[in-house]
Every structure is written in C-alpha cells, then in structure tokens.
Image (spheres, rainbow, N blue to C red):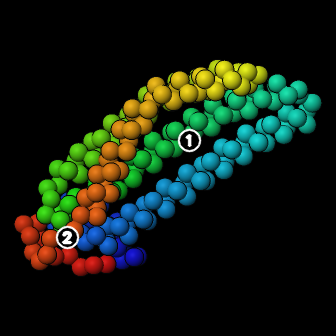
Amino acid sequence: MFEAIRHNLTNLANISGRDSRSTFWFYLLFLAIVYALFSFGLSIVAGGAIAVDAFQAARDGADEAAIQQNVMSGMGNMIRISMWGSVIMSFLMTMLLAASFTRRLHDSNKPGWIAGVAVGLQLLSVALTIGMIGEMVSFVGSLKTEDPTAMQVAVQAHRTKYALSGLLSWVPILLVIVFGIWPSSDGDNIYGPEPEHL
C-alpha cells in the first residue's frame, strides 16, 4: 500500500504508462482518508466555535432567541469555512488524482481524455460551489428560528434549487469508480508494458 502511495506521489505529473488497479485504489483510499480527516477536523473546529459562543452567550444571560440567532450566525460562518475548505480540498484532490487516473485508464486500454472529462466536470462543480458560497451564507443568516415550519419549507426550496449542481459533482466520481474498476488489459498494450501490482 505504501509503495502505491509513494509511486503516485512521485508521478503526479506523469500521464504516460500504466498503473494497476491495486496501485490506483490504494492511492485513492489514501486520498479519501486525507480528505475525510481534513473535513472532520474542519467540522470539529467550526462546530466547536459555535458551541463555545452559545455557552458564552448563555453564561452572559442572553435569552433563548438571542442564543439561537447567535447560533444561526455561527452556522453561516461555519458554512462559509466548510464550503471554502471543500473547494480547496476538491481542487487539490482532483490535481493529485488526475495523472493516476490517466495511467489507470491506460492500463485498461482506454484513452486518457476520459480523465480530462472527469477533471473538467470536477472543476466545473468546484466553480459552481464557489458561486454558491455567498448565497448559502446569506440564506442561513436569513432563517428565522422562531418558526420551524417556515424554516423547513425554506430549506427544502433551497435544496431543490441546488440539486442539479449537486448531481453534477457525482458524475466525475462515477467516472473514476467505473473506469477505476475496469479490468486491466493483459500483457503489453499501446500505453506500455503491464504494470507491477504494488
């Protein structure tokens, strides 16, 4: 596993040759773990800040409505931080995975432009997310906690509005999964000799 990670990290700009399924999937697992740890850490920090602010407001004698409004304001900041964190990590993960995915495509005797399509769609999804950050923060700030039914209706309408861009982000993931598990071509192919299984 560690050899597969080292191999991919030392070949970040190398789109020639082939990588076996095991090499590709060990590396993808490593990237998924890094992404999950980053997201978890970011959530703990941002969520902890909201909790500390709420406890401080309660200790200072604020009423329940003021505490709830303070929490909603903190949620807006948390959304901004987590969305920007997601944008940065998605961009980095895309760049870290592009060459490896290309070599994996070559191993199954598929052209590398499929990786270009996946990267392009992922970058489009990242751009759409950047465009939504300000609106999402404003939307959360506009929610009124004293009317839970109206708040739930507003959240559902907002979710529906952005469903298409959310679906777009799944297309590159599906491409990586489908072509990542595609069987290797036996022996040498036009992209090079059969790779070692790291």
| x and y, in percent, of residue 111 in the image | 14, 56
Relative to 128, residue 15 above or below? below
- Count how many numbered circles sit on residues in the image: 2
**Tag 2 residue:** 184
Relative to 105, residue 155 above or below? above
* Nearer to me, 178 or 116: 178
Residue 15 lies left or right of residue 63; in this view the side is: left
**Quadrant (top left, top right, bottom left, bottom right) of the C terminus:** bottom left
| x and y, in percent, of residue 44 in the image | 66, 50
Quadrant in which residue 108 is drawn:
bottom left
The residue shown at (45%, 48%) is 89
Disc 1 crowd, CA 10 A, few/some/many (<14, 14-19, 20+): some
**Tag 1 residue:** 82
Residue 60 lies left or right of residue 96; in this view the side is: right
The residue shown at (39%, 38%) is 167
Tell us which disc is closer to us: 1 or 2: 2
Amino acid marked by disc 1 = Ser
Amino acid marked by disc 2 = Ser
Quadrant in which residue 140 is drawn:
top right
